[in-house]
Image (cartoon, rainbow, N blue to C red):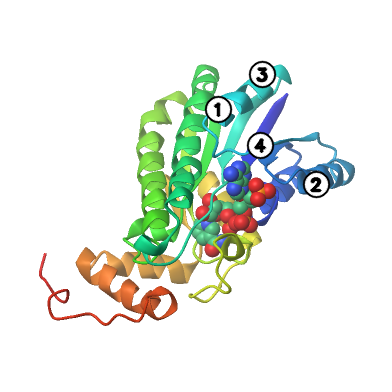
Amino acid sequence: MNTTLITGASTGIGEAFARRLAALGRNVFLVARSEDKLVALCSELGRINSIRAQYVAMDLSKPESPARLFEETERRGLAIDMLINNAGFGSMGEFTKLDLARELEMIDLNVKALVDLTCRFLLPMRARKQGTIINVASTAGFQPVPFMATYAATKAFVLSFSEALWEENRPYGVHVMALCPGTTETNFFEAARIKKPPIRVAQTPEDVVDTAMRGLARRKSHIVSGWANLLMIESERLVPRSFVARVTGRLLRPHFGDGTKETAGTKDRKD
Ligand SMILES: NC(=O)c1ccc[n+]([C@@H]2O[C@H](COP(=O)([O-])OP(=O)(O)OC[C@H]3O[C@@H](n4cnc5c(N)ncnc54)[C@H](OP(=O)(O)O)[C@@H]3O)[C@@H](O)[C@H]2O)c1
């Protein structure tokens, strides 16, 4: 049975993908940790669309989870022809003050699980010469982001990895795309344990899914959601990366810095 696998489907962008694809008549297989939310969503999607909605509750940051998830799709006889690697979380604050275990867990989820799942599901897609993988990156992946150092680096990885796989897999009929949302109205900031986004929230999860659908239709290697985000990223290309890091740092320091002022020794060293 042809099915779309969506990770992080219990809320936010993943849930919006599940709703959209089910409305388009696609069977969905949803993954997240919150079983209660997945149960409710699957029963709603199955009821209002003539599709099969299934779930498995799983913590994808655990090293054994991607293999278990792949085996589960095989056990259920699902042919995953679309994979949306969306599960992810962020953290904000000075790197030295953040919980190291959580930073490493973020790398496990945002990077390791995504690479593992991509590899496992890509092979059968290539054999069938048909398939789609959407990896949810972020506008944070285009530049260093002080006070979100690990998160932005995970998303830079996702962006670069996906664009490379886009080219590698074109001859095999498999479309790999990085989706790059900017600040979006979801539980992301709550999950990152901060009260409110330091940057204005401009988009809804549905806007982000609209962008993804446009990107798929145009077989793009990556797509940025929202014109303002695109403009910001394009303009950043024109200036040195150190300048972008400094400006972003100045924007976020009042929210997350410890009040330490830049000193002459730390300031304005040319690259
Ligand atoms: N919102 C933004 O501003 C924004 C901007 C750019 C990119 N993004 C990216 O968009 C993606 C979706 O985030 P969102 O904004 O929709 O945030 P969200 O509402 O917090 O959704 C995150 C999803 O990931 C799941 N998840 C978290 N940890 C997990 C784990 N260890 N194992 C399995 N599932 C896990 C969550 O479900 P459970 O808690 O039930 O496990 C939830 O379904 C993320 O990759 C994020 O980095 C978000």
The residues bearing labels 4 and 1 have C-alpha atoms spaced at a distance of 10 Å
Labels 3 & 4 near each other (Cβ < 8 A): no
Which residue is the site of mark 2?
36
Q: Amino acid at mark 4?
A: Met
Q: Badge 1: how crowded within 10 Å, few (<14), some, or many (20+)?
A: few
Image spot of residue 209 (x, y percent): 61, 54
Image spot of residue 255 (x, y percent): 44, 78
Which circle marks residue 58 in the picture? 4
Q: Badge 3: how crowded within 10 Å, few (<14), some, or many (20+)?
A: few
Labels 4 & 2 near each other (Cβ < 8 A): no
Above or below residue 20? Residue 117 is above
Of callouts 3 and 1, the N-terminal one: 1
Which circle marks residue 64 in the picture? 1
Of callouts 3 and 2, the N-terminal one: 2
- Image quadrant of residue 74? top right
Answer left or right for 209 relative to 93.
Answer: right
- The quarter of the image holding the C terminus is bottom left
Q: Amino acid at mark 2?
A: Asp
- In the image, 68 versus 259, the foreground residue is 259
Which residue is the site of mark 3?
74
